[in-house]
Amino acid sequence: MEITDLIILYEDNHIIVTLKPQNVACCPDESGDDNLFDCVKRYIKEKYNKQGNVYLGLVHRLDRPTGGVMVFAKTSKAAARLSEQMKSGGFEKKYLAVLCGVHFKKKATLENYLRKNSINNTVYVCTQTEEGAKFASLEYEIKGEKNGLSLADIKLHTGRTHQIRVQTAAINAPVYGDMRYGGPNAVKGKLALWAYSLSFSHPTTGEKIKFMAEPPLEDMPWKLFDIQING
């Protein structure tokens, strides 16, 4: 990922808010592929002519195939305060997803216990008593239906790995393009999952701020729907 590809939604001395492209890792991983985190560090180093190592704090993550809004901390103090907000529920994260199917509740809260298999990096629904089980909760509302697909507005209450993909698949409404969890209902294509809204309190001023970005509306299956994001 080149610096010229970087889309910056907001920047000050404490934070930088960017748009993560789909199929780009948000931070370094075992693949060794270029990633958004390293690209932002290169941008800061070049823009401000920084000498030596550039500090950048990773506050939250998005799965590689998921695109959308991400915030990074430019100071350790900002990183600590934002991380504390994450733990206390001060972050509000909203997603748009295109789900396969139309035969399910149009508005609901999904609550499950999830467990991650670290060997194959797969998450599955489990019982509360299973070792490693973590509670997961989200709420969704269907905003439109077209060609056997549903546009869902999703608000996360917890931030578990692959949470949206696993919980929607559990009600037989997998995310479009999700060949890992979609099962027999899977539809091939680019994963239609987008982090469109992120709000939190600024780490130094305490002001509540919100950042939003549309998914790639020219791409399938997004272009099937009349998508208008708002607060």
Image: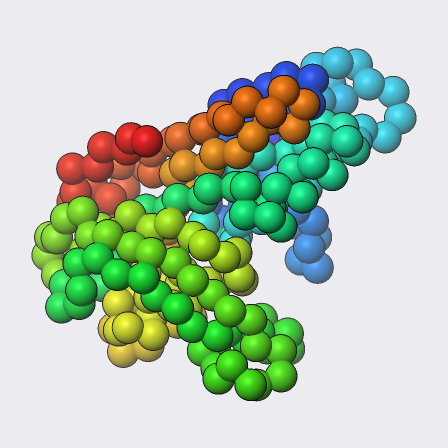
Residue 34, quarter of picture? top right
* Left or right: 173 as drawn, with respect to 69: left
**Residue 210 vertical position relative to residue 219 in the rendered view, above or below:** above
Residue 217 image position (x, y, % from top left): 27, 36
Q: Nearer the viewer, residue 168 or 80?
A: 80
Residue at image coords 69%, 55%:
29
The outermost residue toward the right is: 52
The count of marks equals 0
Task: Say which residue appears at 45% left-offset and 44% top-offset.
Answer: 93
What is the quadrant of residue 45 in the picture? top right
Q: Position of residue 200 (x, y in %)?
A: 53, 34
- Residue furthest out toward the top: 48
- Residue occupying the point 29% across, 48% down: 153
List x then y, in percent, for residue 53: 85, 30
Q: Is residue 37 visible?
A: no
Where is residue 168, by image quadrant? bottom left
Work out which quarter of the rendered image holds the C terminus and state it.
top left
Residue 185 in picture, x, y percent from top left: 25, 73
Give the residue displayed 69% in from the left and 49% down from the top.
28
For the N terminus, the quadrant is top right
Residue 40 lies, with reference to residue 50, above or below; the image says below
Q: Nearer the viewer, residue 194 or 21?
A: 194
Using residue 174 as the reference point, say whether residue 156 is left or right of it. Answer: right
Residue situated in front as seen by the camera: 190 or 13: 13
Residue 69 in the figure: left or right of residue 177: right
From where the camera sits, is residue 210 visible? yes
